[in-house]
Image: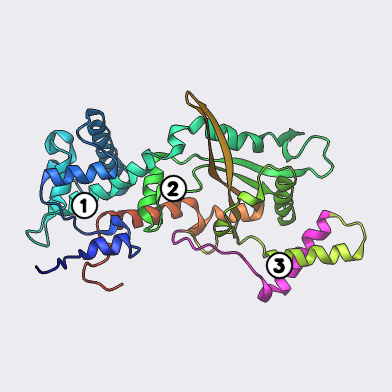
Amino acid sequence: MAINLDFPKQLMKTVIGGFSTIDVPRLDFHSLEEVGEFLKAYGYDLTIPEEVENAWNIFEQAVEIMEKNILDPTEKIPEVLRTREKLEDIRRLLLYASTHEHSNNVIQSWSCAILRVMHCVAHVENDLFFNYTSEIQDQVLKPIQNWVHAKFGKQILGSENDPDQIPLVKFELKAFKERHSMVIKTLSKPETVALEIFDKMGVRFVTATVFDAFRVIRFLRRQNVFCFANVFPNQSRNTLYPTNLFLETIDEFLETKKPVQPEEVEAKLKAVVSSDSHRANYKEKFNPFSDDTYKVIKFICRHMVRIKTEKGLVRFFYPYEIQVMDYQTYKSNLEGTAAHGEYKRRQRKAAHDRMMGEIYFSPDSQG
């Protein structure tokens, strides 16, 4: 008896080849029963009415996100795929996505597009953040907010009597990412899943000077506002001011053993980065949607969240983002191609192209 040598290329490439399932151009199901077994393994048992309703809700969210946030005005989802009344059975969507009649099959292409968005919605929908939103926000953000006070109409970081308090030009709670925003972000990058969206929430400190930006980091560490051991090292970014030049400059001042004013340090930092720019060591983190002119100190922390449930205490680490920059940089970041609106436009374009199957691996390609 000859051994079975049927090894689907798409299966091998997604499971052990490093390609995302979102980028598969066509599924390979042959019956509604086969689709049902797949969905059960995925996480939705369609023999349970509640699970069927959950699947339809994900479908409807996906269609809404596509029509409101991703599709171009001229693009329309075919009516047969647009509502649960027309589709009748959610499993049909996966069968349509498996059609092989000919290469230019509109229903097959649109079915794949909807399923790609549904996949992102399902993972975002079942993230811990949306099950414990208020508890996570309170436990992560309040310890930070408690150190920010108003003084003479201005905000400061530190206690009212702290001689090393830091004046802030702005203190912003980073807008919590909504489901639609998270789905688009997940869809826009092949390597991103909901678990790897670390900036669902965060804070931004805007200081008057670059020197004060570094002081903010020191203050937060000394007060144990964040634990340095819980920082994601591969998520850190510093394009504001090179760390090596900053530390060298501080060492020079320390060696003189003389009192120094903040203005002197700031002036020296500006002079050094100008004269020694060839030695500057910035910490970059590639983001295809960020502009090269966007400058920031950014790092991702994890905070231990504790939630009381009927079954006892639930504990888990949850990530959040801290951004620090000086005011001049903050203003520059709001302008031109570095502006947030431009960032979102580039991200939405990538999500659109990937959703429509314009970015995918060929089943016959190598690698």
Quick check: 93 above or below 294? Answer: above
Q: Earlier in the sequence, mark 1 or mark 3?
A: 1
Amino acid under label 1?
Cys
The residue tagged 2 is 195
Q: Is residue 191 left or right of residue 251?
A: left
The picture places residue 126, in percent across and down from the top left corner, at 38, 39
Quick check: 159 above or below 192? Answer: above
Mark 2–mark 1 Cα distance, whole angstroms, equals: 23 Å
Q: Is residue 160 left or right of residue 131?
A: right
The colour scheme used to paint the residues is rainbow
Query: If the image is split into quadrants, where does the N terminus sit?
Result: bottom left
Q: Is residue 73 visible?
A: no
Assess whether residue 243 is covered by the magenta stretch.
Answer: no
Residue found at x 65% / y 55%: 328
The residue tagged 1 is 112
Mark 3–mark 2 Cα distance, whole angstroms, equals: 32 Å
Q: Secondary structure beneath disc 2?
A: helix
Which mark is on residue 244? Answer: 3
Residue stretch in magenta:
262-289
Query: If the image is split into quadrants, where does the C terminus sit?
Result: bottom left
